[in-house]
Image (tube, helix red, strand yellow):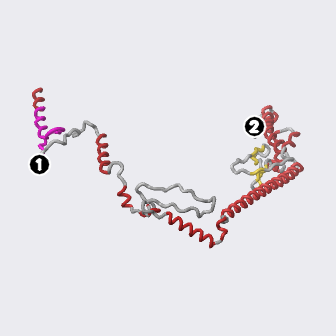
């Protein structure tokens, strides 16, 4: 008997087609059909109550492995920016190609004939699904239109409030003193300017005279809080030069120097550098206060820290003589 290859079990049986009636093949067939049936039943549940939702670009595409056709099938459909759950799978199950491949699969794998109708969708059921999907799309569009109208109403209300605020800000304020006419207003302003100008003139003792405030109407009199004197400095009311006209040279001359000078800073910086050097370095303890004549020249003696350099030569000779005696 010729060997038989089973695509479901993915093995070659040398017993021929008798493998299709074996327990292992029947068990694997039931498990595979059970996985597919669960997804088909979920799609059938959406026939009478189709749903519509907004499509998310970041959402991964969900696919279903069709055991009968031997290929991946998308589960959800798309229409513009909307996602239609189970629409693509139902369309595949109701197609003639799936019916033909399902009949072939049942014939080749010796599956139960009564179970074949559970894995296909009739044309009547698919028609009901399309009608339910049309109603769901209409309801979704109506909700979207209602949301757009509400948003437009809120935008118009916000724009109306903004225009009212701008108009209120641009309108000139209405004050009682402006209603008397331009001639009365100008004369009143001129009298007020003259009175305060007389009050700001300094007297012989440096004191300002208090103007007569009885010209104002009752209930609107000003309260005099006394003269505001500055110690040793004048102000613009006493005829002093305003601060924005004072030259920069005068300001710089009047300022006192705060902190050390730049030369002192450089000396301190140099001292800080010397403190970081090792204390036992050559010349660290040299006596700079010693007096040396102009005719002094180095005698090429040894390195020294104190005294004259020629003294280091005698010290070197004395030390070398002691070393020779020890030897």
Q: Is residue 178 left or right of residue 202?
A: right
**Residue tagged by mark 1?**
294
Location of residue 9 with respect to 83 vertically, above or below: above
Crowdedness of circle 2 by 10 Å Cα count: few (<14), some, many (20+)? some
The stretch drawn in magenta includes residue 22: no
Disc 1 is placed on an element classified as loop
Q: Earlier in the sequence, mark 2 or mark 1?
A: 2
Q: Nearer the viewer, residue 155 or 99?
A: 155
The stretch drawn in magenta includes residue 313: yes
Locate residue 175, reporting x and y percent: 66, 64
Location of residue 104 with respect to 317 vertically, above or below: below
Whether residue 103 appears in this view of the structure is no
Q: Nearer the viewer, residue 255 or 204?
A: 204
Location of residue 143 with respect to 192 vertically, above or below: above
Whether residue 36 appears in this view of the structure is yes
Q: Is residue 57 left or right of residue 50?
A: left
**Quadrant location, the C terminus:** top left
* The furthest residue to the top: 326
For the magenta stretch, what is the residue range? 296-319
Q: Nearer the viewer, residue 22 or 130?
A: 130
**Residue tagged by mark 2?**
9
């Amino acid at each position: 008997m010729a060997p038989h290859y089973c695509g479901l079990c993915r093995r070659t049986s040398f017993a021929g087609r008798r493998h299709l009636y074996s327990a292992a093949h029947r068990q694997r067939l039931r498990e595979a059909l059970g996985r597919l049936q669960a997804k088909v039943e979920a799609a059938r549940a959406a026939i009478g109550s189709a749903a519509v939702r907004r499509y998310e670009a970041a959402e991964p595409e969900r696919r279903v492995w069709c055991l009968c056709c031997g290929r991946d099938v998308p589960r959800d459909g798309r229409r513009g920016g909307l996602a239609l759950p189970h629409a693509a799978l139902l369309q595949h199950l109701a197609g003639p190609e799936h019916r033909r491949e399902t009949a072939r699969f049942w014939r080749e794998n010796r599956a139960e004939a009564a179970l074949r109708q559970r894995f296909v969708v009739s044309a009547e059921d698919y028609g009901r699904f399309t009608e339910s999907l049309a109603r769901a799309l209409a309801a979704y569009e109506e909700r979207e239109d209602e949301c757009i109208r509400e948003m437009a109403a809120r935008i118009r209300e916000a724009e109306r409030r903004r225009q009212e605020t701008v108009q209120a800000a641009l309108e000139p304020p209405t004050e009682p003193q402006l209603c008397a006419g331009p001639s009365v207003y100008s004369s009143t302003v001129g009298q007020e300017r003259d009175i305060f100008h007389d009050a700001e003139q300094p007297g012989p003792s440096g004191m300002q005279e208090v103007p007569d405030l009885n010209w104002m109407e009752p209930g609107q009199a000003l309260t005099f809080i006394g003269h505001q004197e500055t110690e040793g400095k004048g102000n613009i009311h006493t005829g002093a030069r305003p601060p924005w006209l004072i030259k920069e040279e005068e300001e710089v001359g009047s300022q006192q120097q705060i902190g050390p000078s730049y030369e002192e800073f450089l000396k301190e910086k140099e001292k800080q550098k010397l403190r970081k050097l090792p204390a036992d370095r050559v010349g660290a303890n040299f006596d700079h206060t010693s007096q040396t004549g102009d005719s002094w020249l180095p005698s090429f003696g040894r390195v020294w820290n104190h005294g004259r350099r020629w003294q280091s030569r005698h010290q070197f000779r004395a030390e070398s003589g002691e070393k020779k005696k020890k030897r």
